[in-house]
Amino acid sequence: MDRIKILGTLLEREQKRRDDAAQECQALERQARAAQGQVQTLQDYRVEYQQRWSNQFQQSAPIEILRCYHGFVGRLDQAIGAQQGVARQAEARWQAGRERLRQCELKLATVKRLIERRQQALRLAADRREQKQSDEAAQRKAWANRQNLAAA
């Protein structure tokens, strides 16, 4: 029975690890989605900015404003590229978190199966002991009946 208690403690520990991994995975997912959302926001802003200035440039614009426009769009593209890198890293961390969660769930399932097997083995041993005691009691009764018949 001591082993079952130890396995119960192990089960609790693995459940805690799995729960912690699940929380971490959720946090990493939120971070990855937020980073990707920022990429999308920057891309949407770039499109809006280009459309707004495209209309302005159709009328006419001084060369200095055109240079500023191209400089800003270039910096905006750099910011988008940097944010895409952040988003890729966040996605990779989320993937790693999902793998850790999967490993924790696998360990937890293994411990549960081990506990089930141990409990089944204990039940089987108890059933065998009970059957053995029942058989021995029947043999003693039969032997006592034979002794009584022989004495009579």
Image (spheres, grey):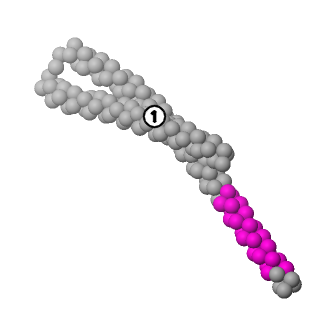
> Can residue 131 be seen in the rendering of this structure?
yes
**Residue at figure coordinates x 27%, y 29% from the top left:** 46
SS assignment at label 1: helix
Which quadrant of the rendered structure holds the C terminus? bottom right
**Residue at figure coordinates x 70%, y 66% from the top left:** 130
Q: Main secondary structure of the magenta part?
A: helix
Residue in front for this viewpoint, 75 or 149: 149
Residue in front for this viewpoint, 117 or 34: 117
Residue interval drawn in magenta:
121-147
On the image, the x and y values in percent for residue 57 come to 17, 25
On the image, the x and y values in percent for residue 135 come to 76, 72
Number of numbered tags placed on the structure image: 1
Q: Can you identify the residue that label 1 sits on?
A: 24
Q: Amino acid at mark 1?
A: Glu
Q: Is residue 129 magenta?
A: yes
Q: Hey, which residue is sitting farthest right in the picture?
A: 150
**Residue at figure coordinates x 19%, y 26% from the top left:** 53
Q: Image check: 104 left or right of 82?
A: right
Q: Image check: 104 left or right of 54?
A: right
Q: Residues within 10 Å of mark 1 (few under 14, many from 20)?
A: some
Q: Image check: 15 left or right of 84?
A: right
